[in-house]
């Protein structure tokens, strides 16, 4: 299979970027999208050019580091896969592919397809954890958790922080990420003591990072490679409302 690639190239965070065109030839249908980029980079390196910069780690859809836009779609045209799980058999021989980084003010481009997603880390640092002492690991079933709650907590915890929700949202909102990280704790007994403080803190940090507001487009849910539902956003909004009605204030310390 042969492809024409239009790849966003940008040398530094402050420099002006643009698309450059490359040919990817003799690509096996079984190759992943990242394998195809590796093939192009090998040829670029042999010719003395700069390889295309992109993030990757596990290449198993677990780490969330490999996100990029493919033909205007976060992680490409397939549902419930990251770009490292996207195989070239998903395209047709001779296709033109436009490849670019996530586009959001809160995700500044560092180089080529690599963006700075430290804003996600700061949202977690603001409240996405349990700080109260919960003791040592309890024996199995020692703390009763209803099966529906356990399932919902597990589904929310599946978020890998890839940023596809932000890239797909017309407002560049990270509310699906924030809601998932707050939500998986809010369904568990250990997360209840700080539940409302957590909601206030994380949403405040989300806004401080420059992410947009959620206006219920639902594009985040469609782009999420783990299929996380926008229902978690509704739950987080309810927790924020309850926190404000209860007089819970944002803690700037």
Image (cartoon, rainbow, N blue to C red):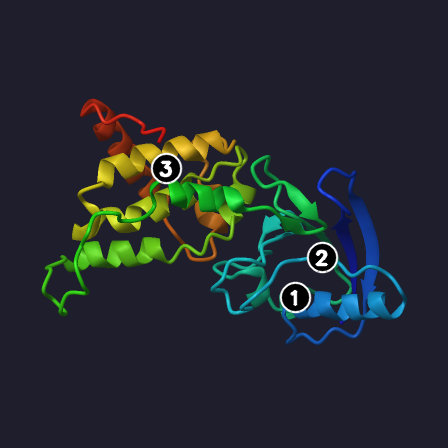
Q: Residues within 10 Å of mark 1 (few under 14, many from 20)?
A: many
The residues bearing labels 1 and 2 have C-alpha atoms spaced at a distance of: 11 Å
The residues tagged by marks 3 and 1 sit, at their Cα atoms, a distance apart of: 33 Å
Residue 2 shows in the view: no
Give me the residue at 21% from left, 23% from top: 247
First-in-chain label (1 vs 2) = 1
Provide the residue designation for mark 1: 34
Figure disc tally: 3
> Where, by quadrant of the figure, is residue 86 drawn?
bottom right
Where is residue 99 shown, x and y percent of the image?
70, 52
Name the quarter where the N terminus is drawn: bottom right
* Left or right of residue 185: residue 34: right
Ranked by sequence position, the earlier of labels 3 and 1 is 1
Q: Return the residue found at the far front.
A: 253
**Residue 110 drawn at (x, y percent):** 67, 46
Chain-order first, disc 2 or disc 3: 2
The residue to which callout 2 is attached is 53
Q: Write the residue at 36% across / 47% down.
A: 180
Badge 2 marks a residue whose secondary structure is loop
Q: Name the image quarter holding the C terminus.
A: top left
Q: Secondary structure at mark 3?
A: helix
Residue 251 is marked as none
Quickly name the residue at label 3: 202
Residue 138 in sight: yes
Q: CA distance from mark 2 to mark 3?
A: 31 Å
Q: Percent x, y for residue 84? A: 58, 65
């Amino acid at each position: 299979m042969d492809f024409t690639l239009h790849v966003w190239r940008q040398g530094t965070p402050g420099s002006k970027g643009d698309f450059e065109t490359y040919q990817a030839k003799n690509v096996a249908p079984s190759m992943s999208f990242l394998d195809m980029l590796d093939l192009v980079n090998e040829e670029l390196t042999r010719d003395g050019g700069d390889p295309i910069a992109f993030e990757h780690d596990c290449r198993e859809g677990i780490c969330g580091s490999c996100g990029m836009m493919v033909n205007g779609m976060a992680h490409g045209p397939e549902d419930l896969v990251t770009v490292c799980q996207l195989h070239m058999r998903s395209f047709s021989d001779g296709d033109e592919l436009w490849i670019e980084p996530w586009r959001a003010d809160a995700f500044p481009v560092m180089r080529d397809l690599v963006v700075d997603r430290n804003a996600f880390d700061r949202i977690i640092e603001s409240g996405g954890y349990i700080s109260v002492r919960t003791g040592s690991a309890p024996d199995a079933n020692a703390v009763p958790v209803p099966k529906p709650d356990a399932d919902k907590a597990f589904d929310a915890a599946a978020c890998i922080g890839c940023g596809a929700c932000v890239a797909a949202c017309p407002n560049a909102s990270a509310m699906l990420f924030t809601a998932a990280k707050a939500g998986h704790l809010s369904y568990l007994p250990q997360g209840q003591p700080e539940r409302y403080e957590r909601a206030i803190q994380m949403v405040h940090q989300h806004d401080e990072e420059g992410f947009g507001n959620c206006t219920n487009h639902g594009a985040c849910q469609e782009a999420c490679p783990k299929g996380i539902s926008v229902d978690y956003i509704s739950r987080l909004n309810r927790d924020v409302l309850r926190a404000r009605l209860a007089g819970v204030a944002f803690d700037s310390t």
